[in-house]
Amino acid sequence: MATGGLKKRHFGGSNSRLSSTGAVMIDSSSIPDGTVTESSQKPSVIRRISSFPTLAGGFNDPSTADVILRLYLEPSPDHSDHDSISAVNSGDQSDVQIFLHSDVLRRSKFFAAQLSDRWQGDCDYSESARRLFRLNFGVTAEIGSISTYITVLQLLYTCDFSIAIDSASSALSILPVALELLFEECVKSCVRFLEAVPWTEEEEKRVLSLIPHLRQEESQELLARVSPAKDNSSEEMLHGLIHSAIHNHPNMAFVKAFVAKLLRDFSSRDTARRVLDWAFKNSLKVVKQSLEEYSSPDFRGDHNETEAIQRLNLHTAMTNGRHLLWLVERMIELKVADAAVREWSEQAAFTSDLQRAFRDDAWRNIVPGLPAVVLRCTSKLASAVAAGSILASSQVRLKLVKDWLPVLIVCKDNVSPMLPSHKSLYIELEETFLKIISTLPMSDARELLQQCLSFSTRNVEDCPHLVTAFNTWFRRATQTL
């Protein structure tokens, strides 16, 4: 049999499952002893297929055939006969005889090798006799059904493979048989079809199982579809999706919702963490730079030009502040906001710029929602810390409240009129800060609680969270351990 490259394409050793004789026999009673090695355990009567057309001088034409091929179902090594037979389509025959032509069969390198190896020795007839060659071929269900083998044999008689290869499923059924029979043209047609059409998840698994049996040049495009060119391709993809969601896409809300779902479903939490951390730092950097430029403007130019630049700085801060809030929500949802909390707690310069900006009236008519966006970011992160979803160190908790409490106070004092949504946000953040303060050492808590007096209201009963916080501190201060 053929060696080298031919063996690489075989499934389960076809050579051991094929035998030949030099006589034409239809019934086993007329077969001489020892002439058929594998058919002795098979049914005595070999049925001729009738469901396929008989063409003059073509497929399954007994009047012109010089090869008789018997296909029979061979038990799988791991299953009984019954299991193997049941694995074949219910309408599939388990033992068939087909009349074929050696010149056509030679399109299959497997049959070409069989015929060239055995022809002279097996056939010993007078010149007047028609030389006939019998092959017995065992089929295992793991590779394909008998009907699939018949389909591939029919394709030997045509150059138009599209009559059989018309879906990913049919290509995947035919390809293993074509590989086993070394029918190269059919293999190429199956591979070319699979390269061009989409697959279901199950079909993709079948493609992956067949790729090792293909040559490198044949499998290159199939592998390119399922194998990333770089190890960090998923990370790069997520980077691009998040960037598009928050910067480029016109239907931003829908795209953000879709990307949020992809992040939730993504298998690698570490990759999602790295991507979100990167996006968070970049958005925060833009907001900080915009507020810094707004708080410390360069008045050397034209007044109108300076005013336009200031408006642009505020709009940039507002837009990227919304992006920042969305990123914070995603990080908290995925429980990967640890680095964001640490970063947010180290913003002394940024919070100073915010306080200067919010004491000025210029922003009110340009970006009235900016204070709420910034405080919502703070509230989301602080609430996760207070709830224990993010386990922050004592130093991080201290700095988080120490830097952002003055921003909250400035917003309460300077943002008017106070909208109902803003009021509920302020109260929520007050309660969260007081909860975090209760987790700090007594000396730090005392300093911060004194700054919280602005939380008090005209009616003491309207600020129970503040009353509870001070009562807790005094109780601890007076108790003896």
Image (cartoon, helix red, strand yellow):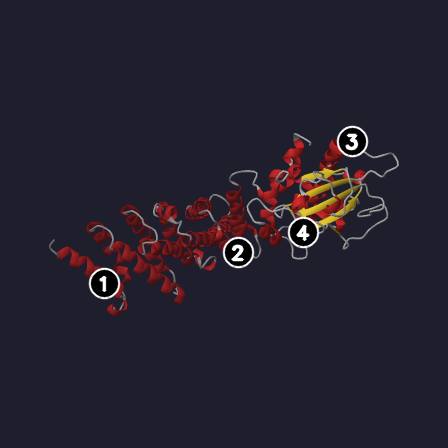
User: Which residue bears the numbered disc 3?
Assistant: 120
For marks 4 and 3, the one nearer the N-term is: 4
The residues tagged by marks 2 and 3 sit, at their Cα atoms, a distance apart of 69 Å
Instruction: Mark 1: give few (<14), some (14-19) or many (20+) Cα within 10 Å.
Output: few
User: Which residue bears the numbered disc 4?
Assistant: 94
For marks 4 and 1, the one nearer the N-term is: 4
Amino acid under disc 2: Phe
The residues tagged by marks 4 and 1 sit, at their Cα atoms, a distance apart of 84 Å
The residues tagged by marks 3 and 1 sit, at their Cα atoms, a distance apart of 104 Å
Mark 3 or mark 1, whichever is nearer to me: 3
Of residue 94 and residue 369, the one placed in the foreground of this image is: 94
Of residue 226 and residue 16, the one placed in the foreground of this image is: 16
For marks 2 and 3, the one nearer the N-term is: 3
Image position of 341 (left or right of 13): left
Instruction: Mark 4: give few (<14), some (14-19) or many (20+) Cα within 10 Å.
Output: many
For marks 3 and 1, the one nearer the N-term is: 3
* Quadrant of the snapshot with the N terminus: top right
User: Which residue bears the numbered disc 2?
Assistant: 258
Asked if marks 3 and 1 touch (Cβ < 8 Å), the reply is no
Asked if marks 4 and 1 touch (Cβ < 8 Å), the reply is no
What label sits on residue 468 in the rendered view? 1
Asked if marks 2 and 3 touch (Cβ < 8 Å), the reply is no
Instruction: Mark 3: give few (<14), some (14-19) or many (20+) Cα within 10 Å.
Output: few
Amino acid under disc 3: Gln
For marks 4 and 2, the one nearer the N-term is: 4
For marks 1 and 2, the one nearer the N-term is: 2
